[in-house]
Image (tube, rainbow, N blue to C red):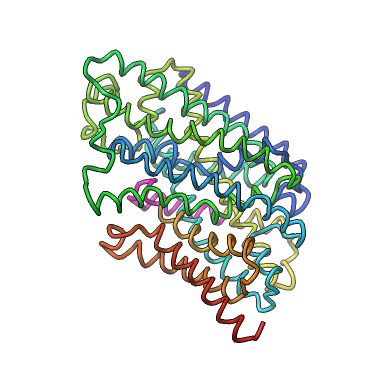
Amino acid sequence: MSVVGIAFGIYLILILFVGFYASKQTKNLKDFALGGHRLGPWVIAFSERASGESAWLILGLPGAALVAGLFEVWTVIGCIMGIIFSWMMIAKPLRIMTGKYNVITLPELFHKKFKDEKGTIRLLSGYIITFFFVFYVAAQFSGAGKVLNVTFGLSQFEGMILGAVIIIFYTLIGGFLAVAWTDLIQGIIMISTLVILPIVGIIQLNTIPDQPLFQWDTLYGGKTGIPAIIGMIGGLSWGFGYMGQPHLVTRFMAIDSSDNIQKSRRIAISWALPAFFGAMIIGLVGNGLLQSGILIHEGEKIFSSHQLPDPEKIMPIMATSLLPAWLAGIFISGAIAAMMSTADSQLLVSTSVITEDLLAPNVATYGGLTKLTWSRIFTLLIGLIAFIMAWRTKDLVFEMVSYAWSGLGASFGPALLLTLWWNRVRREGVIAGLLVGSISTIIWANINGLSILVTERIISFILAFLSVVIVSIYFEKKNGD
């Protein structure tokens, strides 16, 4: 076995060991879904960041920067602003409200907060989360296939199988504790990858005469005027999604105490800054290295991005071309870590929502099985559906994540933000926000030409926000409250 393979194997053994250990601590659905509120600020911060930045960050963003150049800096700025805002405005009040209502999922919080006796919010939330998370998890499986293809020569299909099996397995056995503790390990590997690899790439690029790192004419995507502003806003709009991602806000709900939010916030932001800029720099440096013929793919030198059939493979190609084999193995583990840490979190949230918000309120008995067992069954089923989608789709990781990110962010972000900070929110307003956010994303993303005018990430969020406000005020006046 190669040195890269040995390093990757050690990493897999480590996280599987964590999964087995966590399985011994998982006694009920609350442990499975939130870790029993036993996790401190360091674990929560790394878990939130590792879960938030998936194959999209370590494969999709470098690939986008390789193609679009410095234009992707707007995406980087938007994401960092979204992370800061979410930790500042969502984290602490959400943790306090979680304790007040004794809930383990976001739909359950809305249900209890607004006395949703008909169960409409829970049902609608459950369907929205499950629908968009299938796309999100599929993106992680697709990313795993790409990394393992470049690293070990497996076919992309074989790589997806291996990644899916590992992710589903340790999520099944360990639940939230396994996910959070492996996120800590994965977050450390990811940040190492996103700091060291760009530095090595810059050093290598500096040895090449007349090869600049930045091409400033790409800052606005080669556009001027209104099109340039639209493009800039489109990148910044990624920040809107952070406050409505169920797998991220679950971390805020799971921390041991709201008093630890401030410490956890500092850790998370300190992780995000170098990680996002590092991911973008990988793509920028990769473009220069490709033109110099330094990088090797499938045993041959490549001289431009046009020779690279998939730009999202630039990170593993750089790692295997520039680094010692043992270090490349660790950084390839970082890429797999990015996918695993997100996919396992999304599987966990999806199955918790199905079990707690769809199954439990509507089924009197559980067929002789506990809710914990049903959660594990649904983990397997959703994982299989996501794998089939990853296998059949031709979309890039970046595109699948963008779609799911918009749908979840627009559906839950406005409703959650206003619930925490505006005391006039009504049950009907939350339902309107959920419906408008999800439906507008689906429509906007699937009609050719609309996303060129304004990205679905921003238009869906704005429409959902207005829906919550307008419908809440309408029913407040109608009922004379």
Taking the image as drawn, is residue 292 in sight?
Answer: yes
Relative to residue 437, is residue 15 drawn left or right? right
Q: Position of residue 193 (x, y in %)?
A: 48, 27
Q: Which residues are magenta?
A: 381-401
Kindly indicate the quadrant of the structure image that contains residue 422. Answer: bottom right
Q: Quadrant of the C terminus?
A: bottom right
Q: Above or below — where is 119 with respect to 211?
A: below
Report the number of discs.
Answer: 0
Q: Is residue 387 magenta?
A: yes
Magenta highlight: main SS: helix
Taking the image as drawn, is residue 19 in sight?
Answer: no
Relative to residue 215, is residue 460 drawn left or right? right
Relative to residue 338, is residue 63 drawn left or right? left
Q: Position of residue 120 (x, y in %)?
A: 61, 75
Identify the residue at the far top of this view. Answer: 207
Name the residue located 77 percent from the left edge and 41 percent from the top edge. Answer: 24
Give 381 or 190, whichever is nearer the viewer: 190
Q: Position of residue 304 (x, y in %)?
A: 22, 29
Name the residue located 70 percent from the left edge and 56 percent from the top edge. Answer: 373
Q: Is residue 103 magenta?
A: no
Kindly indicate the quadrant of the structure image that contains residue 296. Answer: top left
Q: Above or below — where is 296 with respect to 32?
A: above
